Image (spheres, grey):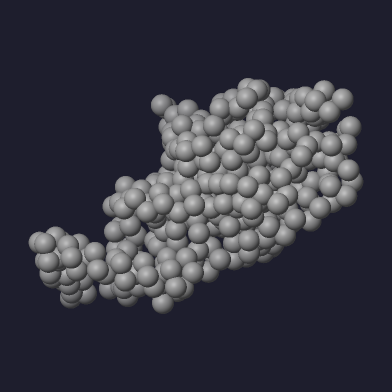
């Protein structure tokens, strides 16, 4: 057994370094920076796709060629007729895997085909609750394995000793390398009260970690807030879900009622989320003008603006790290462009593109990149990220000791205390 553990560890670490996440998500199929298309927009987009397909075929294109249809039927019918093993062929699974392969061929690491079950889970996650271990997860860029980008306080994952940055190598003894994020997440999730065995790779440790985690119903705590020393308010946003808007409204109202003289917005390990949610939050604080704008492949530009009725009047600091991505970078970029906030921490991930999800009538759906977004000053941070005004590495060793000392947060409190004296 020990030899097998060492062999797994060695095979994983060969040529693999712990890197930043590709995209953050809660342990459901809810992904960052996606927008669920409204019915009208969906119908318009489908009409557009059909017209593009027809035009391509008229010009000799092969988006849906007769050759493709004939070959697919040949493979399908040949298998049904000649397949040797005496088993029931799961034609539904065959179809789903074909659809997944088509989407995968785009080369878009954020694109995905969702089965009906996966779409249901996607919507459940967007509503802020699910059954799982209580963590956000992304994909480690260097290894391709899932990585925990945020662990909820009081969650089963936290109780099991899991940490941000832990890479999941196996689920229930099965190596999950090569699976999509959705597939890996679906293995980790499960009915409330059941358990899942995880094999973890942690930076700085030579041996893998083996933990058993109980699955429980998780209410996503997307916003946490409190008052710190010297009337400095602290608001942590862990993800931009549908539920985040009301949670932020309540938190923002509460800190103002308590007379906040400065504000810390903690976006560390926030991988993004719903566009409407981040726009609503930005409108609480920004002056009149652009929040962001997006540009599609055909050059169509869509602007998102703020009426500027409630610009924030107190000093603001934003905490960021390498897991701060997408919608979180949108908010950070807007606050910085208007000179409202300074950022402390480490450079953000650099995801400046938007994915849209389009549902089909059978309950399935697809997601793919549809546009690029820009900060109010016209900066695109895709594959660049946002550098902090004050660079400060997180002291994980001290935090995960008995002290639970957050050096970045404490620095931000001291920094703002000096500004409001």
Coordinates of residue 186 in the picture (x, y in percent): 52, 58
Coordinates of residue 243 in the picture (x, y in percent): 67, 60
Residue at 69% x, 24% y is 395
Residue at 44% x, 58% y is 356
Q: Say which quarter of the image contains residue 333.
A: top right
Most foreground residue, 24 or 335: 335
Residue at 46% x, 45% y is 373
Left or right: where 398 falls relative to 354: right
Q: Say which quarter of the image contains residue 132.
A: bottom right
Q: Number of marks in the image?
A: 0
Left or right: where 12 falls relative to 265: left
Coordinates of residue 284 in the picture (x, y in percent): 70, 50
Most foreground residue, 179 or 136: 136
The reply to whether residue 337 is in sight is yes
Q: Say which quarter of the image contains residue 201.
A: top right
The reply to whether residue 150 is in sight is no
Left or right: where 299 falls relative to 234: left
Left or right: where 395 falls relative to 256: left
């Amino acid at each position: 057994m020990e030899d097998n553990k060492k062999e797994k560890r060695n095979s994983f670490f060969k040529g693999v370094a712990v890197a930043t996440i590709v995209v953050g998500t809660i342990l459901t199929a809810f992904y960052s920076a996606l927008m669920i298309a409204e019915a009208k927009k969906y119908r318009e987009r489908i009409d557009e796709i059909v017209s593009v397909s027809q035009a391509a075929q008229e010009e000799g294109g092969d988006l849906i060629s007769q050759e493709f249809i004939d070959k697919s039927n040949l493979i399908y019918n040949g298998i049904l007729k000649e397949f040797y093993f005496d088993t029931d062929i799961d034609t539904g699974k065959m179809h789903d895997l074909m659809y997944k392969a088509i989407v995968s061929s785009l080369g878009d690491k954020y694109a995905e085909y969702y089965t009906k079950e996966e779409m249901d889970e996607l919507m459940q996650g967007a509503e802020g609750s699910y059954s799982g271990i209580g963590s956000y997860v992304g994909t480690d860029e260097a290894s391709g394995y899932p990585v925990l980008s945020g662990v909820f306080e009081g969650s089963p994952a936290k109780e099991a000793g899991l940490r941000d940055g832990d890479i999941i190598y196996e689920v229930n003894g099965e190596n999950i390398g090569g699976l999509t994020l959705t597939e890996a997440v679906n293995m980790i999730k499960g009915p409330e009260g059941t358990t899942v065995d995880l094999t973890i790779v942690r930076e700085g440790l030579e041996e893998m970690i083996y933990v058993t985690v109980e699955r429980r119903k998780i209410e996503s705590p997307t916003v946490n807030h409190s008052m710190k020393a010297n009337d400095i308010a602290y608001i942590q946003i862990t993800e931009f879900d549908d539920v985040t808007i009301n949670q932020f409204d309540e938190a923002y109202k509460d800190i103002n009622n308590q007379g906040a003289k400065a504000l810390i917005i903690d976006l560390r390990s926030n991988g993004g989320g719903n566009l409407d949610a981040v726009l609503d939050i930005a409108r609480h604080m920004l002056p009149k003008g652009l929040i962001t704008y997006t540009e599609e492949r055909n050059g169509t530009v869509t602007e998102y603006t703020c009426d500027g009725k409630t610009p924030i009047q107190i000093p603001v600091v934003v905490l960021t790290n390498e897991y701060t991505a997408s919608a979180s970078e949108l908010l950070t970029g807007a606050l910085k462009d208007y000179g409202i906030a300074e950022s402390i921490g480490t450079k953000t991930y650099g995801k400046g593109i938007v994915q849209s999800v389009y549902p089909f009538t059978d309950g399935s759906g697809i997601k793919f990149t549809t546009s690029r977004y820009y900060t109010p000053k016209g900066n695109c941070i895709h594959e660049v990220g946002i550098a902090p005004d004050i660079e400060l590495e997180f002291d994980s060793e001290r935090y995960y000791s008995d002290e639970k000392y957050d050096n970045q947060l404490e620095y931000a409190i001291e920094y703002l205390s000096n500004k409001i004296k």
